[in-house]
């Protein structure tokens, strides 16, 4: 660092020395410049003087010459002069500046720099001054030349002056001649004067012509110069166009080459196409030849065909002509055919009509015959039928030996059941026996035919008979989930009526009544307590009717349900214990079906009486008193009366004791004539009920074992045993035992089966029944 410091110090000193040197030099130079400036000023002064001189000279020359070249030269000089003057002025300005700068002492390095700049500028100016000098020298030279020329011009001027003098002399001479001539010609007037004048004028004219020719010459020279310029431009243009032409030529050569190439290509392609064309022509030709051959062959075929077709055509033409004839004749033929067809159809219709009439007549006859046959069938089958139904053992029967089953069935015969009573088996034969497992549906299937015959105008009675709790109400009414005969019968009637609706108009109406203690009450009436009377119709028809008995017209199952509900409510409000009450009264549902055959106008009325009888158990003997005894007596009486009536009917007795009870009296017209009756005897299978079961079954068998046919009509009137008499005594056999074991038993002969033994009769009726069943 010290070393470098020392080095820097040295450097500094050196630089200071240098600056001092430079300052000295500058001062010297300044002095120098100052002197030179003075010198220059002097020079300028002299130049000015010279210029002035020249200007004067020029003005003088101008005044002398007043013209052309000299004048131009002078103008130039003037311009030059002006320029020089300006330069001089600039020089003076600079000089002044230099002087001003010299008065300000240099203070720092910036000035030094300025100094150097100024020095440079100075040198520049000196250079310029040098140039100026050179120019000045030139100018001087020029001035010299000009002066020389001026001298020449002066010389020439002298010459021309001399010439002029000569001319003047000549002219004066001529003038003199002319004057002489004039003088000689003074005598001659005007023309001569004119010539003189012309001559006078001529000299001036000549001068003018000279001037003009000079100016013209100049003008022509300018023109020549201009023409030369134009020529030059033209040459240039020519050159450029030659260049362009060369370029174009090169391009043309290029295009030509390309054209050549394209031409070659085209030729090749043409060649190829030519070949292809030739080939295609050849192919087409060969193909055409083949086709031609085929066409020729075809033609030959067609020719032969044509030959064969000609006869066919001939026949066709013939056919066509005949057809044409036929077509022409067709309308006439058609009309004729139509007329005959119409006549035939009319005849046929007439025939059909008559056949229809005949058929209708036959149908009506067949209908009557059918009814007759049906009646006969019913008569043969017996229009009083007895079914037995055994209810299942229920919880109410309790347990132990008392609830044991005492009823058995025959596997091969559905009309037989066996009852074990006090150690002995007693067998009964009815028209049909339903075991405990038989459903409501199965029971109804057997009843169905009876119900539908009501639509054909028959009166029907269905009774449920048996001790209380044996299932009467269950069979007739059933439960809501499993309805009994009542509801099913009405449903069947509705569907039957609907299926016959095309030909028949039907109305179904319902009444419900109760017989308690031999008095009749309307279960659908407004006054259920009111006792109704049964009366003979006033029209003399012998028909019975119950004035005031309510009849509801029903059209649907809903209607029936409403009616049943209403009847139940009425019955229930009447008693304290419905179960007890219902077991001691007969409940009747009376359905009336009225029909009208629209085609024949036939009217039918059928009545279906569905009766849930009072309990058949014997209470009289158990020492009942008061109302209970009276009830029992009434029930006994009415059931005995029913038995009597059925017996009388089945044995075709002349007198049937309908009037012995309200029930038989009310049902008189539904029990007599060709009416049909079904007795459904309900029994309990329980051991404890065997004596009541036995009584019920005896009643049933007695009812159905009544002999059918004409013999029975003659049978003497027999009285039906009372309920009490039905009781089975200890030991002795049953009053009307089955089949062959009845001989020697009590009673049967007394019952009026005059022509044959009861056993035989029973066997016969059974065989008839079976025959009917097998014959369908
Ligand atoms: P009734 O009217 O003769 O006094 P019910 O019809 O009231 O007897 O029957 C007594 C009881 O036995 C009822 O509970 C009933 O439901 C029942 N019952 C009767 N028959 C049948 C049967 N075939 N199947 C099932 N239960 C029965
Ligand atoms: Mg009942």
Image (spheres, helix red, strand yellow):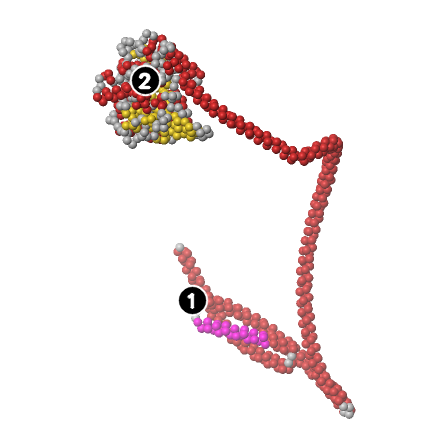
As for residue 97 lying within the magenta part, the answer is yes
In this rendering, would 81 be left or right of 223?
left
Estimate the x, y position of residue 167 in percent, counting from the top left: 72, 84
- For label 1, the SS is loop
Asked if ligand 1 lies within 8 A of label 2, the reply is no
Q: Quadrant of the N terminus?
A: bottom left
Determine which residue is flagged by label 1: 108
Q: Up-down: is 33 above or below 374?
A: below
Q: In front: 376, or 537? A: 537
Determine which residue is flagged by label 2: 644
Q: In front: 574, or 538? A: 538
Residue at (63, 78) in percent of width and height? 71
Answer few, some or many: residues within 10 Å of disc 2's Cα (few below 14, many 20 plus, some between 14 and 19): many
Answer few, some or many: residues within 10 Å of disc 1's Cα (few below 14, many 20 plus, some between 14 and 19): few
Q: In front: 90, or 720? A: 720
Estimate the x, y position of residue 525 in percent, counting from the top left: 30, 30
Q: What range of the chain is rendered magenta?
A: 78-104
């Amino acid at each position: 660092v010290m070393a470098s410091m020392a080095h820097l110090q040295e450097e500094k000193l050196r630089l200071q020395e240098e600056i001092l040197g430079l300052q000295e030099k500058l001062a010297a130079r300044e002095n120098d410049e100052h002197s030179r400036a003075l010198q220059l000023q002097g020079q300028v002064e002299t130049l000015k003087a010279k210029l002035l001189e020249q200007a004067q000279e020029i003005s003088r020359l101008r005044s002398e010459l007043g013209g052309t070249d000299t004048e131009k030269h002078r103008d130039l000089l003037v311009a030059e002069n002006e320029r020089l003057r300006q330069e001089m002025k600039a020089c003076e300005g600079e000089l002044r500046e230099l002087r001003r700068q010299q008065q300000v002492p240099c203070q720092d390095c910036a000035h030094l720099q300025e100094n150097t700049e100024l020095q440079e500028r100075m040198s520049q100016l000196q250079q310029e001054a040098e140039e100026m000098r050179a120019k000045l020298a030139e100018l001087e030279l020029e001035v010299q030349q000009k002066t020389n020329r001026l001298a020449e011009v002066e010389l020439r001027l002298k010459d021309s002056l001399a010439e002029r003098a000569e001319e003047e002399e000549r002219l004066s001479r001529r003038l003199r001649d002319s004057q002489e001539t004039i003088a000689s010609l003074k005598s001659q007037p005007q023309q001569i004067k004119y010539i003189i004048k012309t001559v006078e004028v001529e000299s001036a004219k000549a001068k003018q012509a000279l001037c003009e020719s000079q100016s013209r010459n100049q003008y022509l020279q300018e023109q020549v110069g201009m023409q030369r310029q134009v020529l030059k431009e033209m040459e240039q243009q020519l050159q450029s166009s030659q260049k362009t032409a060369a370029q174009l030529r090169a391009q043309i050569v290029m295009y030509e080459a390309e054209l050549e190439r394209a031409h070659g290509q085209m030729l090749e392609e043409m060649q190829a196409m030519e070949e292809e064309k030739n080939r295609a022509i050849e192919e087409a030709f060969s193909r055409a030849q083949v086709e031609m051959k085929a066409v020729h062959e075809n033609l030959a075929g067609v020719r032969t065909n044509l030959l064969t077709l000609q006869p066919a055509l001939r026949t066709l033409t013939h056919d066509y002509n005949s057809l044409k004839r036929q077509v022409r004749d067709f309308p006439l033929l058609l009309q004729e055919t139509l007329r005959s067809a119409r006549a035939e159809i009319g005849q046929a219709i007439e025939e059909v009509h008559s056949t229809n009439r005949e058929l209708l007549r036959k149908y009506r006859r067949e209908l009557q015959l059918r009814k007759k046959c049906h009646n006969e069938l019913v008569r043969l089958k017996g229009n009083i039928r007895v079914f037995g139904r055994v209810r299942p053992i229920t919880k109410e029967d309790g347990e132990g030996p008392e609830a044991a089953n005492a009823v058995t069935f025959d596997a091969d015969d559905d009309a037989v059941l066996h009852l074990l009573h006090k150690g002995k088996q007693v067998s009964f034969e009815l028209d049909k026996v339903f075991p405990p497992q038989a459903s409501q549906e199965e029971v109804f299937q057997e009843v169905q035919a009876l119900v539908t015959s009501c639509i054909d105008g028959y009166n029907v009675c269905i009774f449920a008979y048996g001790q209380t709790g044996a299932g009467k109400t269950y069979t007739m009414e059933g439960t809501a989930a499993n309805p009994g005969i009542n509801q099913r019968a009405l449903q069947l009637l509705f569907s039957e009526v609907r299926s016959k609706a095309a030909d028949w108009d039907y109305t179904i109406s319902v009444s419900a009544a109760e017989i308690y203690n031999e008095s009749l009450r309307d279960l659908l009436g407004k006054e259920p307590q009111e006792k109704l009377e049964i009366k003979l119709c006033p029209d003399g028809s012998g028909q019975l009717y119950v004035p005031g008995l309510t009849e509801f017209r029903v059209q649907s199952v809903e209607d029936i349900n409403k009616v049943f509900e209403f009847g139940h409510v009425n019955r229930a409000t009447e008693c304290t214990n419905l179960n007890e009450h219902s077991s001691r009264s007969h409940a009747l549902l009376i359905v009336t079906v009225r029909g009208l055959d629209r085609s024949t106008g036939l009217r039918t009325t059928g009545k279906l009486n569905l009766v849930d009888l009072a309990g058949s158990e014997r209470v009289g003997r158990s020492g009942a008193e008061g109302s209970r005894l009276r009830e029992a007596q009434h029930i006994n009486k009415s059931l005995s009366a029913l038995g009597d009536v059925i017996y009388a009917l089945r044995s075709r007795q002349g007198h049937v004791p309908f009037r012995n009870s309200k029930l038989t009296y009310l049902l008189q017209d539904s029990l007599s004539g060709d009416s049909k009756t079904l007795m459904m005897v309900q029994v309990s299978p329980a051991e404890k009920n065997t004596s009541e079961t036995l009584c019920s079954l005896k009643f049933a068998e007695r009812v159905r074992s009544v002999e059918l046919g004409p013999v029975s009509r003659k049978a003497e009137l027999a009285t039906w045993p009372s309920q009490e008499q039905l009781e089975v005594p200890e030991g002795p056999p049953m009053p009307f035992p089955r089949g062959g074991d009845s001989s020697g038993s009590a009673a049967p002969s007394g019952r009026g089966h005059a022509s044959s033994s009861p056993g035989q009769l029973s066997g016969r009726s059974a065989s008839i029944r079976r025959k009917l069943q097998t014959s369908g």
